[in-house]
Structure formats: structure tokens, C-alpha cells
């Protein structure tokens, strides 16, 4: 919403005769995003408190974590998913995941999930069948090809994966 307002302001200065169009579109976008934000908060609250933690490969979802009160447990942070980590690091990851108490850990669309699957098996937790969109939007035509759709897809993945009750977003 903040970015839309800044863009609106800058465009209005560059093309003042178009300012009313930019203002109307910005109002439409911020209204839509406010509804989405409220829906996400509602969904996150359905996750049991003790399970309200994210375990993923890195803190790409820090903004989400901060906005919605769901801490990122960086157990897999710093692990290259393209190479095999040393066994002591895998054991440390397994201990951290078990200590977190989460039922599910999450892979991201941009990484190879094999390491996460191996660590999850060792830690006796599930890997979400749905991947998170953490480093960008999805491909055109995917469930995450816009910012809003990406937020909906990630919220669904997180809520379902951590034992909450997912309710589809209705704008």
C-alpha cells in the first residue's frame, strides 16, 4: 500500500492531468490490499499458537512474519539446497525443527526440495505439499502471478500446513 501511494504521488507530479486516474486506481488498490491484509490476519489466527512458526530455507518471508506475527524459525537458513550439508549440520537442523514444535516445514518454489525432504524425514515432520513463493511471483498463469495472488497462495500454504483453518479469500 505504501508503494502504491508513493507511485501515485510521483506519477501525479509527472503527469498532473492524469492525477485523478492515478488517485482512483491507488484508492482501489489500497482498499483491495486492506481487505487482503484483514483476511490474512484472520487466517493466521486459526493456527494453534504453539504451531504458529515458519521453518523454511531462509528468511525471505521476514516481511510476512513481521506483519502477521508468525515467527520464522531459521532452522534451514544458510543451507545450500544444491549440495549435501555435513552430517553434523543436518543433526543440528533436525534438533532445531523438533524443538520448534511445528508439524510442517516449507520448501520454496525456487529451491530443490530434496534436502528439506531428507531433514523433515529425520525430524519426523511433514514437508508441505504446497511450496511457498518467497523470492518472487509465480509464472504467468500460476496461482501466484500477481502480488495479491501470491499472498493468498502463501497464506493458504502456511495456514493449511500449520494446522489452521483455510477459508478462501473473497474480495
Image (cartoon, helix red, strand yellow):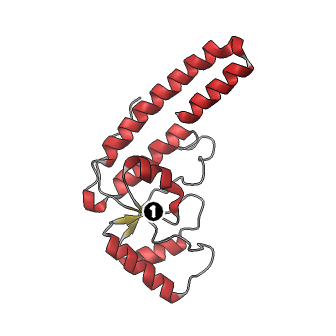
| Image quadrant occupied by the C terminus | top left
Q: Name which residue lies at 35% across and 53% down.
A: 160
Q: Position of residue 148 (x, y in %)?
A: 51, 38
Q: Is residue 27 left or right of residue 158?
A: right
Q: Image height check: is 79 above or below 72?
A: below
Q: Name which residue lies at 34% across and 70% down.
A: 100
Q: Position of residue 135 (x, y in %)?
A: 59, 54
Q: Name which residue lies at 44% across and 78% down.
A: 93
* Few, some or many residues within 10 Å of mark 1 (<14, 14–19, 20+): many
Q: Name which residue lies at 46% across and 56% down.
A: 130
Q: Position of residue 86 (x, y in %)?
A: 55, 87
Q: Position of residue 145 (x, y in %)?
A: 58, 41
Which quadrant of the view contains residue 168?
Answer: top left
Front-most of 84 and 18? Answer: 18
Front-most of 2 and 93? Answer: 2
Which quadrant of the view contains residue 51?
Answer: bottom left
Q: Image height check: is 132 above or below 144?
A: below
Front-most of 70 and 85? Answer: 70
Q: Is residue 28 left or right of residue 37?
A: right
How many marks the image carries: the answer is 1
Q: Image height check: is 91 above or below 108?
A: below
Q: On the image, numbered disc 1 is attached to which residue?
A: 106
Front-most of 62 and 136? Answer: 62
- Which residue is situated farthest in the right direction here? 14
Q: Image height check: is 122 above or below 144?
A: below
* Helix, strand or loop status at disc 1: loop
Amino acid at each position: 500500500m505504501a508503494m502504491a501511494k508513493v507511485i501515485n504521488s510521483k506519477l501525479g507530479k509527472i503527469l498532473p492531468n492524469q492525477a485523478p486516474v492515478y488517485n482512483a486506481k491507488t484508492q482501489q488498490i489500497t482498499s483491495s490490499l486492506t481487505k487482503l491484509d484483514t483476511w490474512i490476519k484472520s487466517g493466521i489466527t486459526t493456527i494453534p499458537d504453539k504451531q504458529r512458526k515458519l521453518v523454511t530455507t531462509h528468511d525471505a518471508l521476514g516481511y510476512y512474519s513481521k506483519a502477521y506475527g508468525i515467527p520464522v524459525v531459521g532452522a534451514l537458513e544458510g543451507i545450500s539446497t544444491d549440495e549435501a550439508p555435513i552430517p553434523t549440520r543436518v543433526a543440528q537442523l533436525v534438533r532445531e525443527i523438533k524443538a520448534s514444535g511445528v508439524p510442517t516445514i516449507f520448501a520454496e518454489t525456487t529451491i530443490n526440495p530434496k534436502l528439506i525432504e531428507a531433514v523433515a524425514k529425520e525430524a519426523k515432520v511433514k514437508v508441505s505439499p504446497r511450496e511457498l513463493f518467497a523470492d518472487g511471483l509465480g509464472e504467468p498463469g500460476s496461482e501466484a502471478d500477481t502480488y495479491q495472488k501470491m499472498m493468498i497462495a502463501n497464506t493458504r500454504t502456511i495456514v493449511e500446513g500449520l494446522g489452521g483453518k483455510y477459508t478462501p479469500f473473497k474480495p
